[in-house]
């Protein structure tokens, strides 16, 4: 499941709703509900300098989460 993770800070929930984006944590919940094998997060807020700092918290919600970096690639099978 490839999904945006615009915000990692749950305090951004109001801003997220106003701008039509989602929290990384919500993406994890969606992936779990959908029965996804893996979640690849992308499309972060420019204000989030180190999105990977949320990896530990996100893995508690969905263990197979990848917090991708600019230019990172994978092959889908």
Image: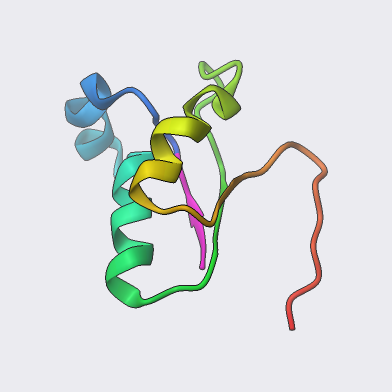
Q: Residue 4 magenta-drawn?
A: yes
Residue 76: x and y, percent?
A: 74, 76
Depth order, front residue of 16/32:
32
Check the image and tell me how it is coloured: rainbow
Q: Quadrant of residue 75?
A: bottom right
State which quarter of the image contains the C terminus. bottom right
- Give the answer, above or below, for where 13 lies relative to 53: below
Rendered residue at 48%/32% (across/down): 56
Q: Position of residue 5 (x, y in %)?
A: 45, 42
Up-down relation of residue 7 to residue 58 (above or below): above
Prevailing SS of the magenta stretch: strand
Tell whether 43 sits left or right of 58.
Answer: right
Give the magenta range.
1-5
Q: Position of residue 16 (x, y in %)?
A: 27, 34
Question: Residue lying furthest bottom in this view?
Answer: 77
Write the residue at 80% across / 47% down. 72
Please give left or right for residue 42 compared with residue 7 in the image: right
Residue 60 picture quarter = top left
- Does residue 8 show up magenta in the picture? no
Judge from the rendering whether residue 68 lies leftward or rightward of residue 42; answer left or right. right
Residue 1 position, x and y percent, is 51, 68
Looking at the image, how many numbered discs can be counted on the residues? 0
Does residue 44 appear in the picture of this structure? Answer: yes
């Amino acid at each position: 499941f490839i999904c945006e993770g615009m915000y990692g800070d749950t305090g951004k929930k109001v801003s997220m709703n106003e701008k039509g984006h989602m929290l990384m944590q919500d993406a994890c919940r969606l992936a779990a509900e959908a029965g996804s094998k893996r979640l690849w997060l992308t499309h972060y807020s420019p204000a989030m300098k180190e999105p990977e700092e949320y990896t530990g918290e996100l893995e508690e919600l969905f263990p197979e989460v990848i917090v991708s970096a600019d230019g990172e690639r994978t092959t889908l099978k």
